[in-house]
Amino acid sequence: MTTPSEPWDARAAHAPSPALLTDRYELTMLQAALRDGTAHRRCVFEVFTRRLPAGRRYGVVAGTGRVLEELTRFRFGRAELDWLADERVVDDATLTFLADYRFTGSMVGYAEGEVFFPSSPVLVVEGTFAEAVLLETFVLSVLNYDSAVASAASRMTSAAVDRPCLEMGSRRAHEWAGVAAARAAAVAGFAGTSNLEAGRRYGLATIGTAAHAFTLLHDDERAAFDAQVAASGTGTTLLVDTYDVRTGVEHALAAAGTGLGAVRLDSGDLGALAHEVRAQLDAAGATGTRITVTSDLDEYAIAALAVAPVDSYGVGTSLVTGSGAPTCGMVYKLVARESSDGVLTPVAKASRSKTSVGGRKAAARRLVDGRAVEEVLVTGPDDAVRTWAPDGRPDDEHGALRALHVPLVTDGVVDDRWTGAQGVRTAARRHHDSRAELPRGARRLSADEAALPTVPLVLEV
């Protein structure tokens, strides 16, 4: 287990604190709550999305491990406090509170990699108002981006079926977003990344050989291929479309022989070219040489290449931008708070089109013969919901319930099963199993409603 004073990874100890990756109003709310005495009321916040992006049938929870890793470093050090004081963001009493800030509350949520639907309570944060309100922007910025990338990545790996997808989108994103995107893609089944920091930090396989610039550097294509094979061996991947593809394949075989690992196509009609290149390779005896395609792929392009002799897909821009849905629209809402008499009371927002449902919630997925049929939202008295668990007994008529919430943080102590390289591997397994439970047709790319309906289960007192 990782405590708030023990970073999950020693390398993280020298990174900047994430405490100011937040919005000013979180600190000004804290100041007002400290003044009127409500800051220490026990509260329950919930992260959920009101709707999926248009046409999407499910989302994928990603970023939970990153939230937990950074939670251990969410501190206001001298540099942060001095800046807040100089800018007069908050008063001295609030600065004193921030100097000693530690999250000592608890979190439960969907296991990273789990699929989710509208109203799914993907994360529940419980603590004092002062502790929990400061995490809103940080939590949402991580979960919204990472889940958007993982949701897009899941559609891509689904379309690819058993052919590997490779992440190579770092140059199309903020430098640190590229690391996060590589991690999120791995959660949804991507087999490798071009990003070395993501590989180092999360134990991901890294991929990449050469770009067109390397070919253009040399006096001719054959010289470039000879140099690459000499440096990397015949198992390398040669990029054959800098000039003429057919000639490029000839030069690649001349440089590496029939034991050439792979060729890459990065432009043109990829489907037609893949058929032509496969025939050319096979005729030369290079039947084991693989074909990798890149060039602005998304889930639809991958699906269109299903009948082409392609062995792997390299995906960049569409992946790191969520393939048209760059955020999941997740919100962080107060759903219960301690009243003046010490009782935890449900609260809810009633604004038109932005309503929320008050009270703590649990969640489960109903399975019939191993196939999900509905998302179950559990509500009722707080103690009953907090301790609720399905009995696990299968029911031939109504199916069995699988509880979706897992413990993430308990009294400020992070469960480190979800962090680091181990956390990514665990999340990838969870996504594989969770997606496999979805009803047939849920993975189609055609626009439709959410794959599962969300239904209430109200507990009695």
Image: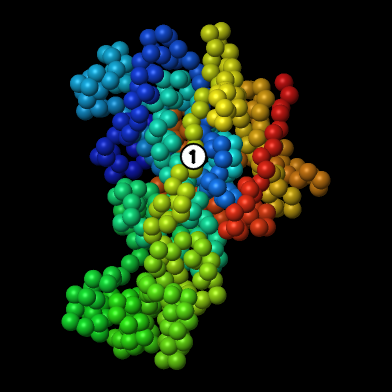
Residue drawn at (39%, 18%) of the image:
29
Residue drawn at (57%, 17%) of the image:
344
Decide: few, some or many residues near mark 1? Use Cα within 10 Å; few <14, some 14-19, many ≥20.
Answer: some
Q: Name the residue under label 1.
A: 329
Query: Which of 271 and 191 lies nearest the eye of the viewer?
Result: 271
Secondary structure of residue under mark 1: loop
Question: Percent from the top left, x then y, of residue 110?
Answer: 55, 40
Tell me the quadrant of the picture where the C terminus can be found: top right
Query: Which of 322 and 414 lies nearest the eye of the viewer?
Result: 322
The chosen color scheme is: rainbow
| Quarter of the view holding residue 130 | top left
Residue drawn at (54%, 37%) of the image:
49
Question: Percent from the top left, x then y, of residue 351?
Answer: 55, 25
Tell me the quadrant of the picture where the N terminus can be found: top left
Question: Percent from the top left, x then y, of residue 363?
Answer: 63, 36
Query: Which of 30 and 25 lies nearest the eye of the viewer?
Result: 25
